[in-house]
Image (cartoon, rainbow, N blue to C red):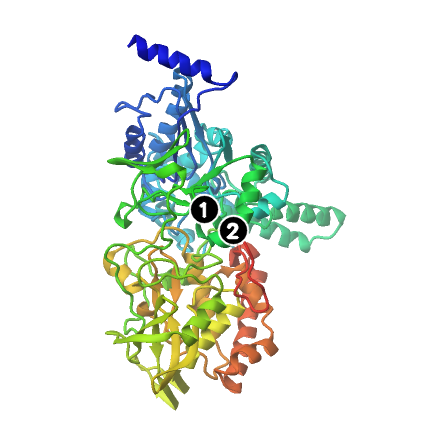
Amino acid sequence: MVRALLLLAGLIWLLPQGTAWAARIVAVGDVHGEIEGFDSVLRAAALMDQDGNWVGGDAILVQTGDLTDRGPRVRAVMDRLRSLQEQAPSRGGRVVGLLGNHEISNLANLFDEQSTPARVYREIWSDFAGTDAGRRQKAGYKKWRGWQKRYPGCVKEGNRAWIDDRGAWFEDHPPGYVEYIEALSPAGEYGSWLRGLGLVVEIEGSVFLHGGISPALVEQGYRSVAAINEAGRLAIEQFDQDRQRLLDEAVILPFSSLWEMYCSLFVEMARLEHDGGAAALERRADLAELNARLPGMSGWFPTEESGPLWYRGLANAGETDLAPELEGVLEAFGAKRIAVGHTPQPGDIRSRFDGRVYLIDTAMAYAELGGRAAALEIDGDRVTAIYADERVPLAGGAAPTPDVGKAPPDPVEGSNGHGDEPVESTNGHQDPAAAAATGSDEVETTASLPAEPVWIGPDGKPLPFAEVDEVLDFLATAKVVKTSGIETGVTLPRKLLLERDGVRAHAIFHTVSIEKRRERLHGGRVVNFFRDHYANNVAAFELSRMLGMTNVPPAVVRRVGRDKGSVQLWIESSQTESDRRQKKLAPPGDWRLTAKDMLVFDNLANNIDRNQGNILYDSDWNLWFIDHTRTFGRMKQLPSPERIGRCSRRLFQALRGLDETEVRRRLEPYLGGYEIGGLMARRDTLVALIEERIATTHEMAVLAISRPASPWSSGLEKKKP
């Protein structure tokens, strides 16, 4: 024992003067109300005992945001982090909480109805209900009725029953709803605590935050932790001030949703248009300026796509492309690594860019999808993934890059043919098309697919293609080494295995070529100038490319043996919408905006055959639209305008900018003149329909925040995130 102490003293003596022992850092990603998982990994990391007491000594715990939504125990999770934050300093430790995009949404009274079922919200809010919850609920309804009379148009589509049915309003505003919003207000117990958290922290060369630091953010001048945190603080503070002003002026109620705030502001500005005098014009301009500052509007720092809470490039961008810019980001912040949550990696912490990036959102709230609780431990140069039942060293802090989009052990291969079952909703498990048709009153800020998709091969590993043109060249020239039939689909497509230079990929081969002057479809619908043709698959891909969409797989026309048809990249490890519904799975993340864009695209392309068999989810729950042989045609009318709700701002802008000359140049190899004429007529109708809805409601009620433009867009070089 004495020899050990002397040896330790000698080692300390050899340390340079001023050297401090590096603290052990433990980082936990998205918790989403999963208190059991959160507790289990805190105990596994030796930070907390069974009684919830801090036992981590001088360790530092970092939680990178998204405590709220999706899981029912949100209050317990926040209480746990607050408690440890209070305990740790007296024992030499430190707990750092950071804000995620879901906290920001909750502070703005914007609830994630896309991924959090209503029953879960009822559980979350019930934890905040006091003994007088019933009285407060009734008082809230009375106030809302008075407010609604002043703003009669501000009732969410699908919830108009609120006006005549008191029970419907009570169901959507259950006991604890009013109390939850009050608790998260600037003066509330949890709201004041959350507003004291930052967006990013740097500890001993490691940067932690929710989404990521994009090269664009650095180019905008955000080159320090302090600069990012200050921008976030000021944005939230400004919103709180604007919200309080609207409360003081009785434009909104204390528990008004963000959508109701948008709507009532729009009504106020519309009224002022008809009032004369300089005072009215001045007030309208003032309100318009306030409106432009609200969460979700372009330029609001906490919801910017390239901002620290939403950026997904560190998880989704190609490593070869982003690596040089990542070095610039790390240099700007004086860091050697970044750890982020936000983009789920179900079940496992993953490293990228030779250990310079760690993805720590392991989807702990989605055990049924393979998620589990996890923590990242940084102890000197040792980096370890901690799970409730094991510790996995990440050698040298640079674990091998994982297979992005890796397939599960037993993938369910999706159907790539025509299905028979129409798309419809089921109790508790709404399909994307039906969900999109009903509309969403929240502000979606991402679409399902990244700007640069990762194409997966048969082995579950990414294909070595950086550009979509490389994929198209491969599909057009690779050797067909195997052909097999597909069990589903009325047009009898075939599955191909292609190979070139050692690279293998699956594709689907459609050869259907049917044209009839008049055809009666299954279900009795009659279609004039019916066309079911393989070339439509390629035309649909090219059209999606012109619109900057990345949800239609690349496709080309080529011969396979004696047959000519379309060869389209196969979506590996996928499942259809029908599969998902049978398994009763709810996709994580933001998918409804993509589904809404799909309905706009289907109306533009005159898709008369969207069904549960041609909506696919890949292993990362990205949404893909396939099988477009029954699209286009000569019809100038929209096939289903009633199903169009909201769409992304980016898609709407692309629709308006669609150039007919370019459309003809790109699509004439696959479509006739009448079909292209019908397409452009439908485009004009779509744009007019969306513009009319904007004029009669509010822009934010129709257009959701757009994602970055796709590098597939016509005339654009590939852009780095």
Position of the N terminus, as image quadrant, is top left
* In the depicted structure, whether residue 489 falls above or below residue 699: below
Q: Which residue is mark 2?
A: 322
Q: Residues within 10 Å of mark 1 (few under 14, many from 20)?
A: many
Q: Amino acid at mark 1?
A: Phe
Q: Going 39% across and 48% down the picture, which residue do you hit?
A: 401
x and y percentages locating residue 195 in the rendered image: 50, 32
Secondary structure of the residue carrying tag 1 is loop
Q: Is residue 129 visible?
A: no
Image-based side of 684 in relation to 178, left or right? right
Q: Disc 2 vs disc 1: Cβ atoms closer than 8 Å?
A: yes
Q: Is residue 132 visible?
A: yes
Q: Going 32% across and 47% down the picture, which residue do you hit?
A: 346
Q: Which residue is mark 1?
A: 353
Tally of numbered discs: 2
x and y percentages locating residue 716 in the rendered image: 58, 65
Image-based side of 458 in relation to 451, left or right? left
Secondary structure of the residue carrying tag 2 is helix
Q: Amino acid at mark 2?
A: Leu
Q: Going 37% across and 86% down the picture, which residue do you hit?
A: 513
Q: Who is closer to the viewer here, 509 or 532?
A: 509
